[in-house]
Image (cartoon, helix red, strand yellow):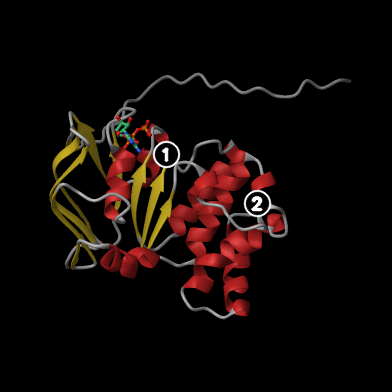
Amino acid sequence: MSALISLENVSITRGATSVLADVDLSLAAGERLAIVGPNGAGKTTLLRTIVGLERPARGVVRLFGTACADERAFRRFRPRIGFLFQDSDDQLFCPSVIEDVSFGPLNMGCTADEARRRAQAALDALAIGHLAERISHRLSGGEKRLVCLAGLLAMQPDVLMLDEPTNGIDAENGQRLRAALHAFPGAMLLISHDDHFIAELATRAMVIHDRRLLPGERHGHRHVHEHWHVHPVDPS
Ligand SMILES: Nc1ncnc2c1ncn2[C@@H]1O[C@H](COP(=O)(O)OP(=O)(O)OP(=O)(O)O)[C@@H](O)[C@H]1O
């Protein structure tokens, strides 16, 4: 079966600086591929290049079998790729949560009723249905993260690209986020510095090292594990 997303010999430069060189990547249906690497390695740049927010100096970006070189070509496929930005404030722009989450389905041609139904279902799936009428920019950081993800799930994309999805998410909401991602039937590209999250969710990993994207090896260690929590002190 052909790849949903592929990069063929892609190099990305900013001015005179090379950010990524000779990148080959292929994402098949059902795969959950983690991209890891240190701060500034080029992980976000890679995802931005896949959806055409940055253009490679060399190489081919292929989405759903079609080589994409201009805005018109990328725009055709963006609704099929849900991209969770690293900064939620770059993603939320409507006054209320329900409007933000309905925006994608509306934009894809759903009726207002259908878009709202999908939006509420996506919020409920993440157990944040109660936030529907809240003002988006007054949410907490973790709430914003979940609302952004709900907006992507409401679009029912073929691929999710998630840039640090667990950032700012507490343990309980983290479990809901993981459950929602496990239930997502499509393919996924994940960027995360959270090793546990990657180990739990990813089916494959690649690592950016010295501007190159290399196959990664996932391995686990058994530890004797000491676990610390802070609990409220019982005042009685
Ligand atoms: N708009 C920009 N203009 C100039 N340089 C940029 C811009 N965006 C990113 N960079 C630089 O490009 C390089 C790759 O950045 P990128 O955000 O892709 O890294 P990253 O691997 O996602 O890092 P992190 O783990 O910190 O999020 C970095 O050196 C960064 O400083």
- Horizontally, residue 163 falls left or right of residue 211, namely right
Mark 1 element type: helix
User: Is residue 20 placed above or below 56 in the rendered structure?
Assistant: above
Q: Quadrant of ligand 1?
A: top left
Q: Residue at x 31, y 27 (%)?
A: 38
Residue 169 on image: x %, y %: 56, 39
Q: Quadrant of residue 207?
A: top left
Q: Residue at x 33, y 46 (%)?
A: 202
Label 2, residues with CA under 10 Å away: few <14, some 14-19, many ≥20: many
- Horizontally, residue 201 falls left or right of residue 12, namely right
Specify whether tag 2 is near ligand 1 (CB below 8 Å). Answer: no
Q: Is residue 33 visible?
A: no
Q: Choose between 203 and 21: the one closer to the eye.
A: 21
Q: Name the N-terminal-most of marks 1 and 2.
A: 2
Q: Work out which quarter of the rendered image holds the C terminus and state it.
A: top right
Looking at the rendered image, the disc whose residue lies closer to the viewer, 1 or 2, is 2
- Horizontally, residue 80 falls left or right of residue 122, namely left
Q: Is residue 235 visible?
A: yes
Circle 1 residue: 197
Residue 155 on image: x %, y %: 47, 67
Mark 2 element type: helix
Label 1, residues with CA under 10 Å away: few <14, some 14-19, many ≥20: some
Circle 2 residue: 136
Q: Choose between 106 and 190: the one closer to the eye.
A: 106
Q: Residue at x 24, y 51 (%)?
A: 55
User: Is residue 221 placed above or below 42 in the rendered structure?
Assistant: above
Residue 225 on image: x %, y %: 46, 21
